[in-house]
Image (spheres, helix red, strand yellow):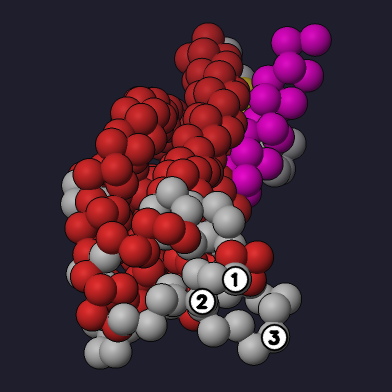
Amino acid sequence: MGQCGITSSKTVLVFLNLIFWAAAGILCYVGAYVFITYDDYDHFFEDVYTLIPAVVIIAVGTLLFIIGLIGCCATIRESRCGLATFVIILLLVFITEVVVVVLGYVYRAKVEDEVDRTITRVYDEYNGTYPDAASRAIDYVQRQLHCCGIHNYSDWVKTRWYTEAKNNSVPLSCCRASINNCTGSISRPTDLYSEGCEALVVKKLQEIMMYVIWAALAFAAIQLLGMLCACIVLCRRSRDPVYELLITGGTYA
């Protein structure tokens, strides 16, 4: 019964190490996705520390690939030193992922204040005639999120661009995609997106941060199972001088 349990633990551990390799790729993808997406919205927040969870999760993903390699070799070779190293590294990565979750929640809560503090300035910097970074950011957000203005299209009336343009219209990025020949005129509000961008930008950024949080939680749970199996193998290896090898079926003293 005990031998069956230890063999099962080793088999599960080898399987988990293969999952770690897959997890490494997924975590790096999630981190890269956060970087790329935040780059599209970086004008709406100034706190660069918001990206710390994404940086950490990419580092964890890279480390998980190495952990998977160490774990496979240590499990197959029944190396006590290798398994102990494997458990210690897993524990450190587990702690790091807990930190990522905490930071994710902290920065997720700060997103709304960040956007609220900067969005008015970004709209004031808009220059539709000579597009700059702020203009491209606003046009991108309005088209992607189907929104117009900060709270609604009427916010454009208060901007410098509207005053200088003197054409009683908003940027064409406010036009609904389904409307043909839209000129952005505020005299035809049904042609324009009705929702403001502030709430949608906050929602989008918070969703992105939740991807990081859920990814970290999911793989932290897998790592707990990996540490448990490795500890079972280590304990059995220490107690039993005649130990069954996973691959050959022989004994290892």
Q: Nearer the viewer, residue 33 or 18?
A: 33
Please give the label number shown on residue 188.
1
Question: In terms of secondary structure, where does tag 3 sit?
Answer: loop
Q: Quadrant of residue 157?
A: bottom left
The residue at 29%/89% (across/down) is 129
Expressed as whole percent of the image width and height from the top left, the position of residue 186 reads 50, 69
Q: Nearer the viewer, mark 2 or mark 3?
A: 2
**Mark 2 vs mark 1, CA separation in Å:** 6 Å
Q: Nearer the viewer, residue 22 or 49?
A: 49
**Mark 2 vs mark 3, CA separation in Å:** 13 Å
In the rendered structure, are the residues bearing label 3 and label 1 in contact, judged by CB atoms less than 8 Å apart?
no
Left-right relation of 157 to 207: left
Expressed as whole percent of the image width and height from the top left, the position of residue 41 reads 36, 61
Q: Quadrant of residue 225?
A: top right
Please give the label number shown on residue 12.
none
Span shown in magenta: 1-19
For disc 3, the marked residue is 180
Question: In terms of secondary structure, where does tag 2 sit?
Answer: loop
The residue at 59%/65% (across/down) is 189
